[in-house]
Amino acid sequence: MLRTIRADLHIHSCLSPCGDEEMRPRAVVKQALAMGLDMIAICDHNSAENIASFMGVGSEGGLTVLPGMEVTSKEEIHLLALFNRQEDCMALQDLIYQNLPGENVEEVFGRQTLVNEKDEAIGVNRKMLIGATLLPIEQIVSAVVSFGGVTIASHIDRQAFSLLGQLGFIPEGMALDGLEISARTSQEEARRRFHSYRRFSFVRFSDAHYLEDIGKSFTHFLLEKTTSHEVNLALHHQEGRRVLEQ
């Protein structure tokens, strides 16, 4: 049976150097439930090392946590990659790590904290997660598809780190599944402003870096299950699944 799912599929944890240190599993899941969310995705910059902890806590609390990542392409374009299975997300991480140069400078970019299910810090990631990978956008999208994931272009209405901001257009034939708009742009404005890309579904998520931002922007999906596969069906208007008007 299809039902309405309230989803915020772009949330950062304390692993992202720009993410607040309070963005830890128990705190994030508690806030997501308080905001009435049914499904979230943790999408840290170029890494998925905190995913297991968040999925474990989410399962305990009855909240679906999808494994995800916000990947930065060679062109400095942000892309959301969402998966059903943690191992598929980790396969993408392996590819990203092989093509991610540099080491984090904590004093400049921020701490990259690894946490367990008790919200305890268990280490730090030394990679330059805030940086761009050596992979062009087409290769990243193809990799996500090959690993069975969903690809959504991040915050296309922003100038910085967005597909349209960096390239000015969406390349023909690129296998994107959807376009994210930020809280500053309404669905109506997005359809008007990005009329030439109306073939894509538009979604809104919080891009939360702080607890208080979780669920401030979200998307209602009509789904049977809380999986990335169902989200993909909704983005492509298949089998009765769809993105509902906000």
Image: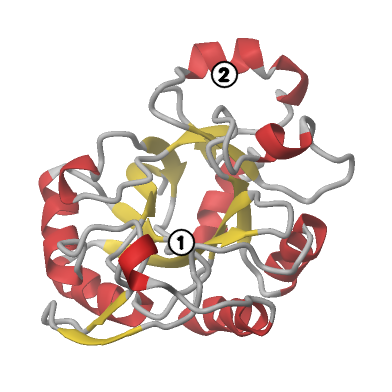
Q: Amino acid at mark 1?
A: Thr
Q: Amino acid at mark 2?
A: Ala
> Which is more toward the observer, 241 or 67?
67
> Which is more toward the observer, 120 or 88?
120
- Vertically, is 159 above or below 129? above
- Vertically, is 190 above or below 60? above
> Which is more toward the observer, 176 or 171?
171
Upstream in the sequence, badge 1 or badge 2?
Answer: 2
Q: Percent x, y for residue 133?
A: 66, 67
Q: Residues within 10 Å of mark 1 (few under 14, many from 20)?
A: some
> Which is more toward the observer, 54 or 244?
54
Q: Residue furthest bottom?
A: 122
Q: Percent x, y for residue 214?
A: 24, 45
Q: Percent x, y for residue 173?
A: 88, 45
- Vertically, is 217 above or below 123? above
Q: Which mark is residue 43?
A: none
Please give the residue where the numbered disc 1 appears in the rendered image: 227
- Could you tell me which residue is drawn at 65 percent across and 49 percent down? 77
Q: Which mark is residue 190?
A: 2
Disc number lying in front (1 or 2): 2
